[in-house]
Image: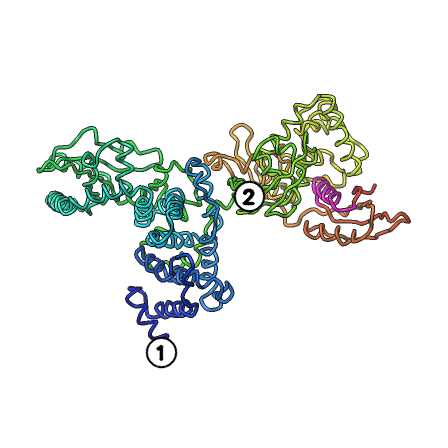
Amino acid sequence: MAAMSNRFSIAKPRFPGLSDHDLEQVAKALALVDEAGEPQSDAPPRPRGIDVATILMTVHIDLVSILAALLSDSRMESSQDEASIAARFGPVVASLVKDVRWLNTVNIYSPDMANQPNQAEILRRMLLAMTHDVRAVLIKLAFRIQRLRNLHREDASIRRFIARETLDIYAPLANRLGISQFKWELEDLAFHQLDPEHYQAIEKSLADSRDQREAIIAQFVETLRHQLASHGIKAKVHGRPKHIYSIWCKMRRKRLTIDELYDLLAVRVIVDDQAACYSVLGLAHNQWQYIPKEFDDYIANPKENGYQSLHTVVIDGQGNRIEIQIRSKAMHEFAELGVASHWRYKEGGKYNAATEKNIASLRQLLEERNHDNLLENFRTELFSDRVFVLTPAGKLIDMIKGATPLDFAYAIHTDIGHGCRGAKVNGQIKPLTYTLRSGEQVEIITAKNGKPNRNWLDTNLGYLKTPRAIGKVKSWFKHQEQDDNIAAGKAVFDKEVKRLGVKHIDPADLLKPFKLTSETQLFQAIGRGDINSRQLAAALRIPELAPASFKLAPLKTRSNSVITVADADNIVTTLAHCCSPVKGDDIIGFISHRRGITIHRSDCDNIRHLSQEQQKQLIKAEWSGQHKASHNVPVIVEASSGHDLLIAVSRLLHAAKINITEASLKTHHDASATLDMRIDIESTAQLSQVLSRIEQLPNVVEARRKV
């Protein structure tokens, strides 16, 4: 108890503003860190958790983040695992500690990335994507600041590496998250290591004139405030400091000396509304001479990202050039929290709604303490639709979520994709249908003169997910000889007809969905990959499995409607040919000005890659009726061995949520086996998908509908 009391008293001066209850939690964490002891004398210097937590206090961070910073101390890694931390401080703190520990040990950056801006950006996205809570990134930034403060104790090569990594990766992240005080310190500390000569020259120039500059700004602000008050304009006026690295960048960009920079002396004026902005501008221009070429009206002519403000440079009575930025409260909030965040027009980043929401939430968290709901649910959605994987050489590849090693191969090079025959993920052989996860390293095994396999285009088998890879495979088949494509397409067609047990085919009905006029054209389209197995199965309608699922427009009464759009069941719709949705699929509607509402599968590639503007044309859609259609279908599976066959098939169908109503396994004298069963199926397309997946099981020779 005495130890806890001592820790409690130590915590008070270090962490002002926390309640007594919060300070008790901090004291508990400090006590655990103390128990871990001091690091070995020959261990490389690493930031202490208490120093990192103290840095975080400068941005008014919450208790959860402070505790996570303390418990992320490197001395704690061996003594406190995630479970023990969760038991003492709760699952949120434990999850944060886990993320921070990962961020503190990730080793992907290389100095070559400085010459590959895309690689640096992918790494920044990966760091954001792989942390479950964006506050972990904030804590990591504080760790990096403390590391930089102690960097003088390390070797020159390490100092340069850490400084370069900071400017390429971590300072832009701080900028992106809107934490200017972190960004400034990260940049200045890193710049000091990389270019001490220019750093010290600028620092000396600023030091020589600091008192003078502060006096000039103070006098200018007082005069401006007096002018605004005398005209009844309510405003906040304050000086706007510049940091050393920012000054250096501007000197290089504009090829100016430090004495020629206008915005070393700068003020910002925030008023209530737009009209007041121009009133302030008029007063400033009447009071002081202004430099016309330095005037920018971003209110009348906003920047492309929506940023609005008035920028002008005036000359005071002593001949000093002073920059003034004038904006309304709404403009200031938009610039600080909205889509006009400073980082986008400085870094040229692309808009991402999830990114913006998380950045805005984090900034609110830094400005105010009482955000209980925000803290409880502060889970990041940044880049949740992306995965970031590494080549053996350490190059980062940004891919869509769900991508496979085969997609990765095509992302590297088309020829590597064509020749791909296997893959190692983190050194272990994985199937080409394996779903990649962020941070994994992938090595592709190729065959000399290899070529694509037609199964890769079978959507039922899941070899490819990215449109680029699918397009490359289709392109390869399109460039083959016409006769080869026709022969290959007919073989695929015949196999599908046999597998589905289709006896009678009406050529006109079969060709109509594809807008073709002959079977030869159909076979060629299949052989070229223009028609995939799912589309073919949907067209090969088994009569007993083809109820209302294939109607292109719903009936007008709710009880018989096929599709409900935006909770209405009297909307005329068309099923998209690109993904051939069938009843039971998750679907979404796309409003077309020419074709009305087209229904797509929710995971359709064309839907996933709509532009931000096109996404506004999406509308909620679902299959009508409370119960899905179900048909009991007899299926036969032929295998070279009956060993574990029933178990493997049962597991596969269970995962697909397909019910088995009957099953019998017969083993033959040559060890081969026949599995005869009945399963509940909703549609022809679903049956085709299930049979394709069964055929991928070990020892399975054929799976087909029994007729």
Q: Quadrant for the N terminus, please.
A: bottom left
- The amino acid marked with disc number 2 is Lys
Whether residue 294 sits left or right of residue 191 in the image: it is: left
**At numbered mark 2, what does the secondary structure look like: helix, strand or loop?**
loop
User: SS for tag 1?
Assistant: helix
Q: From the viewer's perspective, is residue 448 above or below residue 143?
A: above
* Residue 233 within the segment the image draws in magenta: no
Residue that badge 1 annotates: 2
Q: What span is in magenta?
A: 682-699
Between residue 45 and residue 673, name the one nearer to us. 45
The amino acid type, in three-letter code, at marker 1 is Ala
Question: First in sequence: mark 2 or mark 1?
Answer: 1
Q: Which mark is residue 401?
A: 2
Q: Quadrant of residue 705?
A: top right
- The image shows residue 258 at horizontal and vertical percentages of 21, 37
Give the CA separation, mark 2 to mark 1. Answer: 52 Å
- Residue at the location (63% across, 27% down)? 475
**Are there few (<14), some (14-19), or many (20+) residues within 10 Å of tag 2?**
some
Which of the 4 image quarters holds residue 26? Answer: bottom left
